[in-house]
Image (cartoon, coloured by chain):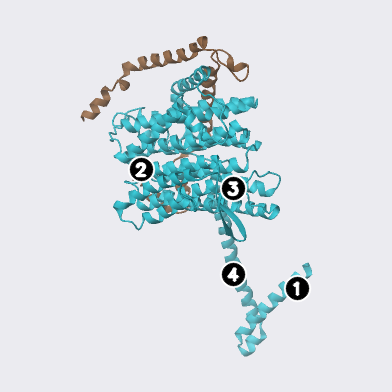
Amino acid sequence: MLELIFPPALILIVGALLIGPLRAPLRPLIVLGAPLLTLYAIWQMEDGILLTAQFLNYEIQLIESSPLRRLFATIFAIMAFAGGLFAFRQAKWWELAAAQAYAAGAIGVAFAGDLITLFLFWELMAIFSTVVVWCGGTEGARRAGIRYATMHLLGGVLLKIGIEGVMVHTGSIEIQPIPLSNFDGWLILAGVLINAAAPPVSAWLADAYPESSPSGSVFLSAFTTKTAVLALILLFPGQQILIWVGLYMIFYGIIYALLENDMRRILAYSIVNQVGFMVCGIGIGTEMAINGAAAHAFAHIIYKALLLMSAGSVLYMTGRRKCNELGGLFHSMPITALCGIIGALAISSFPFTSGFISKSMISQSAADQHMMTVWLLLLAASAGVFLHAGIKFPWFVFFQKDSGLRPKDPPWNMRAAMILFSAGCIGLGVFPEWLYALLPYPVDYEPYTASHLVTQFQLLLFSGLAFFALLPLMKRTNTLSLDFDWLWRVAGFNLGRKTLNGLAALRLKAISAGEQAWQMVNRQSWRNAAVGYQNTGQMIFWAVLVLLVVVSAKMMI
Amino acid sequence: MSADNKLQKSWLYRPENRKKLWWGFAFVLAVTVLAQLLIPVHGHFAFDEWFGFNALFGFISCALMVVFAKVLGYLLKRPDDYYDKKSFDKKYHDKHSDHHV
């Protein structure tokens, strides 16, 4: 066996550096090869701390492996491969390089054995995910990228202050459950939750992701929020507050997705929704719940990437992104439609898809803990997922009215990536033991009972009935929906502009007052009149002013 | 234009089939509920073993969410160039008409 002495993330970093300088025909080799090599490296590693280094007088642990970390790193590597397959013939090379560096950050976080290493890779993700947003190439993408970067750098600052606080107060940089007993813990939690798109800053996700390129949103959907989920599992398992944060995210995602018209923004809101299920599971915190959150993250990355590949294919082939301009595409894009439907069924936890075997563990854990309210809300939310993503996305894009568009299915590599992930969704749904074997705790759960199948079909199909019965209420409009980010994009911005304008006016007033005062001094200055010694008058004026300030300051003290 | 005609003839889009689709859907819905007669449901709490609980709960909760979203929409929906117009950079709005690809 290969003796591994370097972090697996390094493979992707080297890959990212190579993509640019290499000649174009060789690039696919790196785009597809580096993630596979990474996957191999991940599975060569044993559990435990494998590599340490010195950094600023701290011993940092560059690689710490465990089943949970391996699970996340595995899906990140698979995602980097499938995303690369989807993107490599259409995307610009700098997007491919940035996406690979972004994936490297995610895998680095997955194996980070201490808070410093975690923070370094965390920021690597922030930087290169911003580049991926910018690769959308439009003015809208540029602006959304700046807002995105601002939010994530702010999150990074909170995280860093929190980490420094922990280092100072406990002397340890170990990654271990952090109590929310002091400010440090809360800051780290806030920093991590910003990346999870928790309230009140959930809006960054639906703001930025739909502005990226057709392939960019596929990469973006996977890494940032799921590393945050992993960090929450490692640092804050069983923190009750996460249950309610998660539930808020779940319903926020559903409601905003119902209001939304942009097909990729619908899917972006449903990322918040799905991450909400994971955050809620982490808050419940039992072995079953943590297993469920981890399994759901794994399954979610596959079906959400699949959904965004399907939407990305539609965008790539039609150039349109709004539901009211789409519809009736199933006929000319059968593969895209079928793969989109499989992804939609998986996100809705339809039996025999990956969502069914993962999300149900979270609900089960709520029931096991006799949390009736939480369980009922999760049940309602499961129905709501089918409503906002499971039916709404395929219905408005592929069916609905005939938009008159006749795009073909996208090029072969995009189709191949979609088929690969469709197979993943169904494979995990039919053979849940594959995923269960990778989970951090032993699994004592059987998703396929007759009772569970009946209740799940009832729940989902009747929410489908609600969708079609209430279709008139969901007429598409050319609108966006205000969110908390209105506070800084409009209110805060206006306040800032008014303050600056006010200060500018004040400055002008001060200058003219100063000039008037100077003229008065100048006129009354006997020296000026007698000798024509202009500068002395000015000097006296300033000397008096400074004296006044100093004296008054002294008096105040 | 042949593709156009093909779509017009597509089974899903013919108006006379709408009723058939609804009846088919209704049949499937009935089957999922009636299946509970044969397959006893093991709930976590007492009430979730009631006949058709999940069907009713799924329908009602979805209806509530749709109505809630509708009402919230009156408050929160803005034209989708809202933020562009709010932008201090007047030139931006003119440039922004180019979306994707």
Distance from the alpha carbon under mark 3 to that under mark 1: 46 Å
Distance from the alpha carbon under mark 1 to that under mark 2: 73 Å
- Element at label 1: helix
Q: Nearer the viewer, mark 4 or mark 2?
A: 2
Disc 3 with disc 2 on a shared chain:
yes
Q: Dot 1 corresponds to which residue?
A: A551
The quarter of the image holding the C terminus of chain A is bottom right
Q: Work out whether residue A276 can be spotted.
A: no
Q: Chain of mark 3?
A: A
Q: Nearer the viewer, mark 3 or mark 4?
A: 3
Mark found first going from the N terminus, 3 or 4: 3
Q: Are marks 4 and 2 in contact (CB under 8 Å)?
A: no
Amino acid found under the numbered disc labelled 3: Gly
Question: Residue A248, position in %: x, y?
Answer: 58, 35
In the image shown, does A247 or A321 lie closer to the viewer? A247
Q: Which mark is residue A191?
A: 3
Q: Dot 4 corresponds to which residue?
A: A511
Amino acid found under the numbered disc labelled 1: Val
In the image shown, does B89 or A181 lie closer to the viewer? A181
Distance from the alpha carbon under mark 3 to that under mark 2: 32 Å
Q: Chain of mark 4?
A: A
Chain B tint as drawn: brown
Q: Which mark is residue A85?
A: 2
Mark found first going from the N terminus, 1 or 2: 2
Mark found first going from the N terminus, 4 or 2: 2
View extreme (top): residue: B37
Relative vertical location of residue A403 with respect to residue A190 in this rendering, above or below? above
Relative vertical location of residue A89 with respect to residue A352 in this rendering, above or below? below
Amino acid found under the numbered disc labelled 2: Leu
The number of callouts visible is: 4
Mark found first going from the N terminus, 3 or 2: 2
